Every structure is written in structure tokens, then in C-alpha cells.
Image: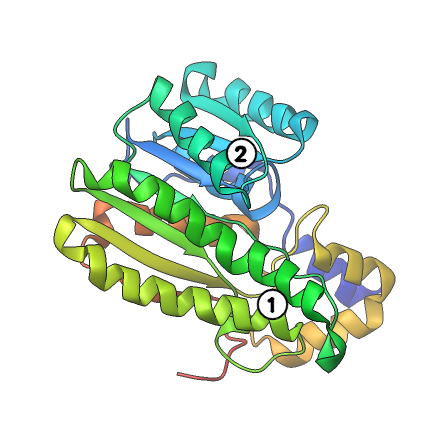
Amino acid sequence: MGALERRLRTSVCYRARDRLTMDLQLAGRVAVVAGSSRGIGFGIAESLLSEGCRTVISGRSPERLEASRAALAARFGPDRVLAFSGDLTIRETIREFVRFVQQYWTPIDIVVANIGVGSGVRGVSADDAEWSRLLTMNLLAPTRIVSEFLPVMLEHRNGAVILIGSITGLEATPAPLAYSAAKAALLNYTKNLAREVGGSGIRVNYVAPGNVLFEGGSWERRLRDSPEETSRFIRGEVPLQRFGKVDEIANVVAFLASDRASFLTGACVVVDGGQTRGL
């Protein structure tokens, strides 16, 4: 392992005991984090729990999800963490998710749609099936989640919706075309939805992470398989010359979920170490 690779890995080493709360006055609020059994979603759940939220996590794998729930429950208390397992690309499963949360906690104050997958066919050779897969995972699934939870949130005319996108939706990158198109569409959806529901007290924002390194993620695989190429890319493209940390994304989401961001809606918050060049 080279010196730069060691520095890149060290820069994202994360220890839960080092997390600092921000006193965002979220104690007692109910947060739903879709796609949160690991990675950025797990970090978001952790940050919201640290700020006092009662938090519902979700994932497709029951075993992984239970391990994540148990880890969070051990730190924050079993009465503050719920877990729902299911395929959230399916609308009926999302409706089951809404009913599940309502059985235990109401009102629902915060919904984070962290659903998506970036791995796919690059270039113009992607066929219709590949486009359909990436559009479903990165556009249709998160918008379905929001559309099913929104009526519940509108009942008490208050709440925050945060959609997790990507810098690939902002400017040209080497990412799969279908993935980038989906993330761009998700941003447009966010801005238009914010206008639709703003009068009802619901704020809607979009977070665009850059290159975030975490266990089991795509950047960990790239760093393992092509360490020199990956190191050169980060050094050349990211002004801070390191990967992002999960908690650096999660803390932004927690802020957006709080009343400290009460006049912030329809926004795209970029967290990428300065990588993007557009306005």
C-alpha cells in the first residue's frame, strides 16, 4: 500500500465514539431513512439518532439490517430504533413501510430517501434493460418513497424531506449515462416538489455527495482493485485530495432535517471536497 493510499484510507477512518452532536433540537422527532443498513444511509441514521431522533432504518437484506439495528440499539437504546426490511423499488412495499412506521410512531417528521445504485454499463452501449434498472433504482424508487410518505407528513403540515443524489447529476462525469440522467432528474424533481409543498410546511432538499469511502462501497472496491489509478484520480480531481467521510454527508442531512435550516428548501447541497466545477 502506497503512502497516498494509506493517507486516503486514514482520512476516512471513522470511529463512532468521535461523533459530535450539533444540538439541532431534533429530540423526539421521528425520522425514516430509506436504504440505511450500511454506508451513507447508516451514517445518516446514526447522526439523526445522535441528535435525539427516533429513527427507522431499512434495507433489503434482513440479516444485514438486523445487525445494523442491533448496533444502533446498543448505542442509542432499543426504544429509539426500528427496522423494516423490503424492496423499496416496489410501491406496495413502500406502503407497507409507511403502515409499519405508523404502527409505532407518529407524526413522521423527517424522510430521507437514500435509494440508488451507481454501478452499471458506461457509455452508449447500455440497452433498454440497463436504462430501466438504473432509472428505477435512482429515480423511480426515491420518488415513490416520497410520494407515499408525503400524505402522512402533510396531515400535520410540517416536516423535512431529503433526497440523496450525486454530483453526477450536476455535470459531466465518467459515470453511467443512465445513472447520471436519473440523478439529474431527481434534482429537478426536488426543486419542483419544494414549490408544490412549501405552502404546507414541508421542506424538500437534495444532497449531492462526491466520492465517499466506506466499507463495502464502490470506492473501496476501486481503491483495492486499482490503487494507483484511484489515488491519481482523487489527487487530480478533488481539491481537498481525499475521499469524503460518511459522517460529513450525514451531518449535512441532519442539519437540513432541523429547524436550523427552516428557510432552506428546493436547494442542492453539494458535499464533494470541491470536485465539481459548475456554479
Give, as a three-letter code, the residue at label 1. Answer: Tyr
Q: Which residue is mark 1?
A: 179
Q: Which residue is mark 2?
A: 58
Where is residue 212? Give x, y as percent. Answer: 61, 58
Counting every numbered tag in the picture gives 2
Vertical arrangement, residue 261 with respect to residue 150, above or below: below
Say if 54 sits above or below 275 in the image: above
Question: Which comes before the other along the chain, label 1 or label 2?
Answer: 2
Residue at 38 percent across and 70 percent down: it is 188
Residue 51 in view of the camera? no
Q: Nearer the viewer, residue 154 or 128?
A: 128
The residues bearing labels 1 and 2 have C-alpha atoms spaced at a distance of 22 Å
Residue 106 appearing in the image: yes
CB under 8 Å between discs 1 and 2: no
The quadrant holding residue 9 is bottom right
Q: As displayed, is residue 226 above or below residue 137?
A: below
Q: At numbered mark 2, what does the secondary structure look like: helix, strand or loop? A: strand
Q: Quadrant of residue 224?
A: bottom right
User: Where residue 228 sits: x, y (%)?
Assistant: 83, 71
* SS label for mark 1: helix
Q: Nearer the viewer, residue 33 or 271?
A: 33
**Horizontal and vertical percent for residue 82?**
47, 23
Q: Residue at x 65, y 55 (%)?
A: 213
Dot 2: few (<14), some (14–19), or many (≥20) neighbours within 10 Å?
A: many
Viewer-closest of 67 and 244: 67
Q: Quadrant of residue 199?
A: bottom left
> Residue 270: x percent and y percent?
44, 67
Question: Is residue 121 shown left or right of residue 182?
Answer: right
- Looking at the rendered structure, the kind of residue marked 2 is Ser
Number of other residues with Cα within 10 Å of mark 1, as a class: few under 14, some 14 to 19, many 20 or more: many
Left/right placement of residue 216 relative to residue 154 reads: right
